[in-house]
Amino acid sequence: MSFLELRAVTKRYGDLDVVSNCSLSVAKGEFLCLLGPSGCGKTTTLQMVAGFVSPTSGSILLDGKDITAIKPNQRGLGIVFQSYALFPHMSVGDNVAFGLEMRSVAAGERRKRVAEALELVHLGAMAKRFPRELSGGQRQRVALARALVIQPPVLLLDEPMGALDAKLREEMQIELRALQHRIGITTIMVTHDQAEAMTLADRVVLMNKGRIEQIDRPFEMYEQPNGRFSSTFLGKANVFEGRAMRGLFEVKGHQLPCCTAAMSGDADYIVRPEKIEFADPNLDSVGLVRGEVSARAFLGNHWLFQINTPLGIMQLTHANTGLPKAAEGDIVALTWAAEHARIVPRDATQ
Amino acid sequence: MSTTPQIGSPTQAALAEGGRNWLPYWLSAPGMLVMLAFVALPLVLTLSLSLYPFQSAGGVGDQMTWANYADIATDSYFHVIFARTFGMAIVVTLICIVIGVPEAYVLSRLSARWRAVSMVVVLGPLLISVVVRTLGWAVLLGNEGVINKVLMTGGLIDEPIKMMFTFTGVVVALVHVLIPFMVLAVWASLQKLDPATEQAAESLGAGLFTVMRRIVFPQVIPGVLSGGLIVFALSASAFATPAIIGGRRLKVVPTTIYDEFLGNLNWPLGAALAVVLVVIVLGVSLGANWLIERKYKQVFQ
């Protein structure tokens, strides 16, 4: 049963649908990520859940109750803002206590819960400090403690890692995930970072141009993207336009293997770079396509190859298990298993 | 302000060589000279003038004395005038805060086009001579003035409400004259305020009024302080408005100084009054500044 539900929510500014007819449901305790490029409507969607933006049409339900018309200060949701939005004139303790004060929690109880919340984010000793005396990571923890202390039914996170450097971001992601599991709070996070979405989310909502492209668990979304946008936004992909017919896929006169015999007609053929293998170019019989290595890059844990083939430029990655298998200028043959290819009908909207 | 000095620029080079960079001093020298000639020097002369006795035959004696200050300190006539002046300045400052802060807040939340229009409206009064504006208020506030005429014709009152030559009248006119300074100062502070802090407070359950009182106002304290100091100093030393609206009967320190200089020709007493006024305004300003900066040091960074 869904705990939070968006029903055909649309936000229109002038003639532009910033969010268009979005429906999704979040289960209790689930961690959902709204993922998409900037301007895709993910933040507007979050703002509508928070109540700062009211939808042009559609409704939002929390625990079966319609909250579309309820003001943000009556919704009781916990929100962590991109800028953290800590109150600069209040100490860390007062920041966290603010929500409890608004709920008229007695002073003794308030102190106890503030201490607990700060302990939860490992900032027990910082209550007397002021926000400007904290590092970026600490500020984010305070923002999290402030949102969690009111025990909200839903936690909303708006690009919470945006202001952190890469290493700290990774640490905070793991910590946030552990924290969310521990307290089991229903969470919606907005991010444009696909790696972050995959690390944290139970399910990812991929958005583009105000529409939801795909909702899936990270693994399913990565393995079974439902279109060109999904396949290229979440991870890298080689995408070829062609025609599917009777268990084969034809691209520019080349026949590629595929498993979906049922489909026919114009479609996109998607294969992930890490699913492609080098074959021996001297054996004519193997290899699906030949090409010349045009570029090679070392990325630490893997090598990235760019190969000029008759199908177009293809990318392939190999785990770094020793020396690379090809060099720039080499003629190589490429092969991949039919089940690793994914064929999706050409999307009319793209 | 926002451009960082380039490495290897003349300033950097001079500093790197350990030499002192004199350029800023040279550039500010003309301004400093003007300040010296037209502000510091007259102040020193006023101070020295206040230390000489006034001779009833006219003119200034040559024996230094504290007598003028003793007069001011002991004469209850002056006490009333000083109390009235600073009471007025405090009331005007408070009203400017109460009106100016919300006004600046509303302005900062308008769309760019309406903001431009509203800014002109707010700053409009500053474009007109203070005397003209004050005479405008006289036309409105007088016994035969527009407000009383309208109220009487409407049958709301039987006889005119006395507004000219009253404390209230002067306060109203001063607030009108000085409020742009408060709005501008608070407006500048509001630019630094992260609007998400208001949303954060709202999401934690705060209503509009609580957001204003607990979140917005404390963050614009620096603007309120600088605006308040300007308004306080300008209303304590305002001359034209109290002279026209307050008249002879409602004397404040600046009009008293004027009368001493030009009416009684008692220049030394006038000078002593001026010195006392400057010292009190300065003292109150610095004191308020120190107290508020200490109390709200987190928002002053």
Image (cartoon, coloured by chain):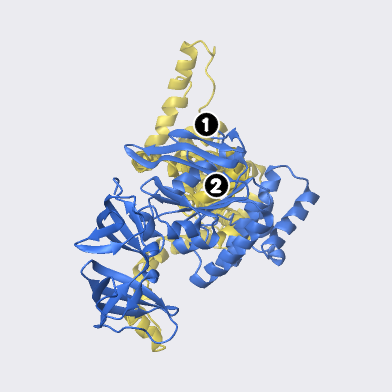
Chain colours: A blue, B yellow
Q: CA distance from mark 2 to mark 1?
A: 37 Å
Residue B49: percent from left, percent from top: 51, 59
- Pick out the residue farthest to the bottom: B17
Choose top left, top right, bottom left or bottom right for residue A286.
bottom left
B27 or A228, nearer to the observer: A228
Give the numbered dot on residue B169: 1
> Residue type at mark 1?
Gly
Give the numbered dot on residue B198: 2
A162 or A95, nearer to the observer: A162
**Left or right side of A348 for B298:** right
Residue B70: percent from left, percent from top: 65, 54
Packing grade of label 1 (10 A; few <14, some 14-19, many >=20) is many
Residue at image coords 51%, 55%: A217
**In this rendering, which labeled residue sits more in front, label 2 or label 1?**
2
User: Do badges 2 and 1 share one subunit?
Assistant: yes
Looking at the figure, which quarter contains the N terminus of chain A?
top right
Choose top left, top right, bottom left or bottom right for residue A86.
bottom right
- Pick out the residue farthest to the right: A108
Residue A297: percent from left, percent from top: 34, 79
- Residue B167 vs A79, above or below: the answer is above
Residue at image coords 49%, 13%: B152
